Structures are given as structure tokens and as C-alpha cells.
Image: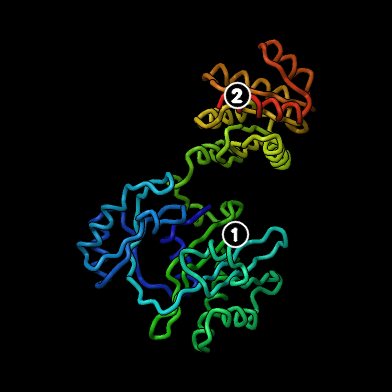
Amino acid sequence: MNLHEYQGRALFRAGGIPMPDGDVAATPAEAEAIARRLNGQVVVKAQVHVGGRGKAGGVKLASTPKEAAEAAKKILGMQIKGLTVQKVLVVPAADIATEAYAGLILDRATQRPVFMVSAAGGIDIEEVAATTPEKITRLAVDPRYGLLPHQALTLAFTLFSDITQVRATAKILEQLYQIFISNGCTLTEINPLVSTPDGKVLALDAKVIIDDNELDRRPDLAQLRDETAEEPSEVTARKANLTFIKLSGNVGCVVNGAGLAMATMDLVKYYGGQPANFLDIGGSSNPEKVVNALKIITGDPEVKAILFNIFGGITRTDDVANGILTAMKQFKVNVPLVIRLTGTNEEEAVRILKAAGMQALNDMDEAVQKVVEVAKGAA
């Protein structure tokens, strides 16, 4: 679950990380009132779950409360990478001497949180990572001990040379780690982490991603989810207890089991296709899950063909077949279906589909090749 910047700032400030004051506004009048309270030059920032806000015109400088209202008026309602801006964050404009980057991410390969820090911080940190990765210092943290003081200092020395700033930065990194652990995060990021002309070290931004598995344990965090800022199909899938991620291809995939879903997408790519989604209906034998899956996928106009790849273990293939037929009775499916079923109640599933004039394949490679060909032909 992604948090908006203003929500991440609240977590950071509660964790002791020094950040300038600020507040969120949903109208130009609210933005003007916040700017008047801050009493100085402010920055008005779009609150959406995507990067590149500044380049898209979603970050504006305002010298007066009236200018802040005008900036908010221009930003609110604008589209940034397909998402509508519904709120803006108003914060004081900081006097910056240097910019750095500090982030903490969960590395699933090593099963450890990994710090990444760089003195070449700012909005183009992705370019730094791609072109000059040597400018980024990495440190894997042993979760048994946490971030040790000497490790925090070592990282801080790569960002600053002034000992006062180094100590301040080390403390911020320790606080960032505690926020990461205590809130079940998969990412916490400060970009930029700045020094001011008077020597202070401040976090000017807050990016936080929380593992969805944490939300059942932390209803206070679950309340921070903003469904209006998420892909609508993913919201619908979550409410239907489906694991779904929208991608940019044209081959819709309905699969049971995350491993098989990943293998299916790999095979689609191997045979020259582009998967339109990751969708795992799980081990349930409820035909309604199949109905919901088809509703979600057929709602994507980019999908030109749909592949069902079902390996029946706990999942009964005859229930999947019945789900497909139920869906086709409830609404019109305007794209071709390629169905591969094998496993539990396979013979019954094939009989059900054959009676409806539909074919079920048994071989996975054959099914994937066919759906890629169909999608290319319909493109």
C-alpha cells in the first residue's frame, strides 16, 4: 500500500525525523489558509501515487497565500500519469545548501532491509542508479540487531563531512529504520535529504510503501489507504479477494497460484506476447471468483485475448469451467478465450465446456502459443 507524501510525513514526524511544518489541502481556499499560517514562501505539491510530479507541473512555488491558492487551483484536478490530483501538500520553501538521498527497501533475495544512500540526491536519483551506480552506497541490515550506531555513522559520512551533520544524519537513518520496522514497510525514502545554509539536516520528502500483509494487524494503517488514487481494477480485485496487478500488455491471464501465474507470464513473453495483468484466483473453488476475474480483465480495452491456465489441485477445474459459463451468461465477453485445464475433475470440466461449444487444451505451451497468436491477430 502506497502512502501519500503527507501521510508519510506524519509517520516520519511521529518517528522524530526533522521535517518542515506543512499541511494538506483539498481546495484552493484551504491551501491559501495553510500558506498564510506558514507565513512565507511555500511549495504546493500534488498528492498522487506516482513519481515525476514536478516535471508534470504538479509542484509549484508560491510567494504569497494568494499565489498558493492559484497554484492549488491549477494542480487540483490535473491528471498525472492517469491519476487525478485531489489533494495538495503545502509546505515552507526550504533554503537548501546540499541535497542527498536516503532510502530503505526490503530486499527479498537476502530477506533483509537494505539502506541505499547517495550524496547525488534529488529528483533524478533513478538516473543516478542507472548511469552511475557507484555513487550509491548500500548496506544490508541484519534484522536480529537492527541498524547499529557505527553503521549509521558510516552511511552518514558518505553524505556529509561536517561531524555535526554526520551525527544528525546518523540519527535520522536510525529513526528511518525504526519507522520501517514498526510499520511493516517495504520501502521508506527521503528524497531529498537536505542540509541548510545554517547547517541543519532536514527531510523534505517522504515516500512510504507498506506491505499489505501488515494491514490486518494494523487497522490504523489500513485506514490510510486511498482507493481513489489506485488503479480501479486493482481496487475491485482486492474487494473480490483476487490478487491482481495491471500491466501494459494485451494478453489477459487468469491463473491459480502465484508461481504458475509468474510462469505463465514468462511463457507469454517467451512466445512474443505481452501479459496484460497478473491475476491469481487462488486455491478457492468458488465459481464467483472466475466471474469477477473475467469482469476485471474484460474491463481493460487493451486486452485482445484471455488465457485461462488452471492446474487443479485444491482448485476444481469443473468449478472454473462453470465460472466461465456463468460469466458469459451475465455479460458479453468480446475477446477470444483460450482455456487450458488440467488436474482435479479435469474430465468433467472438459465435458462442461464441450457441451457449451468451447474447447479446453491440456498442454500449457500450446495454450500460451495460441493465445499470443490470437492476441496478435486481433491487435
Q: Is residue 317 above or below residue 247?
A: above
- The residue that appears at 50% across and 73% down in the rendered structure is 100
Task: Give amino acid for label 1.
Answer: Thr
Quadrant of the rendered structure where residue 200 is? bottom left
Residue 29: image location, x then y, percent:
23, 57
The answer to whether residue 243 is seen in the rendering is: yes
Residue hosting label 2: 377
> Which is in the foreground here, disc 2 or disc 1?
2
Residue 222: image location, x then y, percent:
51, 52
- The residue that appears at 75% across and 26% down in the rendered structure is 366
Task: Give amino acid for label 2.
Answer: Gly
- The residue that appears at 68% across and 15% down in the rendered structure is 358
Give the total number of marks visible in the rendering: 2
Residue 344: image location, x then y, percent:
79, 27
Specify whether 162 is left or right of 211. left
Residue 278, which numbered label? none
Specify whether 59 is left or right of 5. left
Residue 186, which numbered label? 1
Secondary structure state at the residue bearing disc 1: strand
Q: Is residue 36 above or below residue 231?
A: below
Specify whether 121 is left or right of 273. left
Looking at the image, which residue sits at the far front?
131
Residue 294: image location, x then y, percent:
57, 28
